[in-house]
Image (tube, coloured by chain):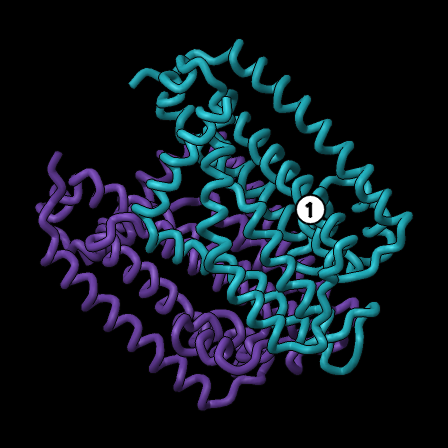
Amino acid sequence: MVKKFLAFSRVSWALSMEYRSQAILWMMTSLLMVIMLMVWLGVSDKGAINGFTRGDFIAYYMVGWVVRTLTAVWASWEMDYQIRQGTLSPLLLRPIHPILNEIAANLTEKIFRMAIVMPIVIIVLILSPDAHVNLDIVSLAMFVPAMIGAWMLVFLSDYLVGLLAFWTTQTGAFIMGFYGLRLLLSGIVAPLVMFPQAAQEFLKWTPFPYMLNFPTAILTHRLPANELWFGFAVQAFWVTAFIFAVRGGWRLAMRSYSAVGA
Amino acid sequence: MRNLQLFRLFVKSSVLVELEYRANFVAQALLGVLWSVITFSSVALFYSHTDTLGGWNYGQAMVVVGMSILLGGIISTFFEANLQRIIAMVRDGTMDFVLMKPVDSQFYCTLRHVRFSGLTDVIAGLAVTTYALITLRAAPGLAELLSFAGMLVFALVLAYSIWLAMGACAFWFVKVDNLQELFRTLWDTSRFPVSAFTGGLRFALTFVAPVAFMTTAPAQALLGRLDVGTFVAGLCVSAAFYVGAAWLWRRAVRSYSSASS
């Protein structure tokens, strides 16, 4: 299993080295984090908003950028393409689940993207003395599982949307629609605490904030213990739910799949 | 004149295509509505914490949001599908057949397809703009409407030129999907008045990727806040972009050496 996984990783590493220039251009699309940060900085120059000072915004968006880079996904587009073109069929004949290939490709490309994002984030944080990031052992120990949970949520939900390609040819619309919701609700457009109180109460039960806002908040704010454990519990619930959904969805899909002829 | 007739044919054949793929039309139209709501709420969110953003109050900023949704709709109706076709044709070599046709390649490649589902965004954009004007209790007079029409034309020329330039780039780099993705990210700034940004980004959004002239300036015109300088700058920037993009297209076509397997 591990050997197969490493083989997938090597292939994907070779691919990303081949398309280096594209990866750099792709990176620029994550400029959105910087854009949102600048708008918030413009708003907060008269004083703190909901407890967020300028430094807090910088810290939030820089850590959020790292989280977003680590949780970037594109498996659904690949699946849509493979299913429509029929290239999924040979992959199904392999004695290994195609999701493993997607996971390996996803994790490998992360190394590449982090190499670009990390230096920028570190420099910005060093140049902004009032941007505070918790780098103590306890915060980091909390951040790692929250980050893994966030990646699983984003990857699995994206994979679920991708599975729709087995039944509809309109997967692209679903992918973009879900992406839009994620932009707005996961903490990219605004940190969760900027939402109206009622919206916050509702959103904390949905999977969205745990895709970005939650791990980011762990590193940039002192979350009270009860919020922390509540967050982990809801995140774990959604991860489990999505795992079952992906398994169930995949089984249903295999039953109905009748390959597109080339 | 002949081009006009051709364009009518293009529209007609596009209607037939949309009728053939009705599910796609419905899905894309609904997606347009969802994104309009997301765009609207993401700006409204800021105004729950502040009264002004870059000197624009809520109602004024909502005019910019309306412009952003409207222009986005026009881009997806007229430009995006054509760019995708250009990329595909360069990749598989079918561009040969276009270049052999006795018609201007730029005209044909950039206006061949119309994607009507984008019109939901256009309607949503108009709705948001109307809502904003009602909030402001502002009724634009003739002077405002005229300068607005002018700025809108500049905005359309700019959008057309940017997509034309991307199409030209497809001849050299083939995979320009990323370029489109990059512009889409920059387009995310278009829902905010450009004065919400500072320094280098504001400069870039005005002159490098002139998003400012596409949404902020038409909104200013509609609100009667446009100064002559901005109008003239809009004229110059859009003219410069068009000339540059058309030149790029001609060079690209000349360097095209077909694709063979």
Residue type at mark 1 is Val
Note whether A175 is above or below B161 in the view shown.
above
Judging depth in this view, the residue of A60 and B180 nearest the camera is A60
Q: Chain under label 1?
A: A
Give the left or right position of residue B184, taking residue A69 as reference. left
Name the residue: 81% across, 41% down.
Answer: A205
Q: Is residue B58 among what the camera can see?
A: no
Q: Which residue is mark 1?
A: A144
Quadrant in the rendering for residue B115: top left
In percent of width and height, residue A189 lies at 65, 59
Quadrant in the rendering for residue B66: bottom right
The C terminus of chain A lies in which quarter of the figure? top left
Chain that appears purple:
B
Note whether A60 is above or below A215 in the view shown.
below
In percent of width and height, residue A104 lies at 48, 34
Give the left or right position of residue B62, taking residue A218 as reference. left
Name the residue: 46% across, 80% down.
Answer: B203
Q: How many marks?
A: 1
Specify the farthest residue to the front. A137
Name the residue: 41% across, 15% down.
Answer: A94
Judging depth in this view, the residue of B175 and A181 nearest the camera is B175
Chain A representation colour: cyan
* Tag 1 secondary structure: helix
Note whether A191 is above or below A153 in the view shown.
below
Quadrant in the rendering for residue B238: bottom left
Judging depth in this view, the residue of B102 and A53 nearest the camera is A53
Specify the farthest residue to the right. A226
In percent of width and height, residue A81 lies at 40, 31
Name the residue: 51% across, 40% down.
Answer: A107
Judging depth in this view, the residue of A98 and B227 nearest the camera is A98
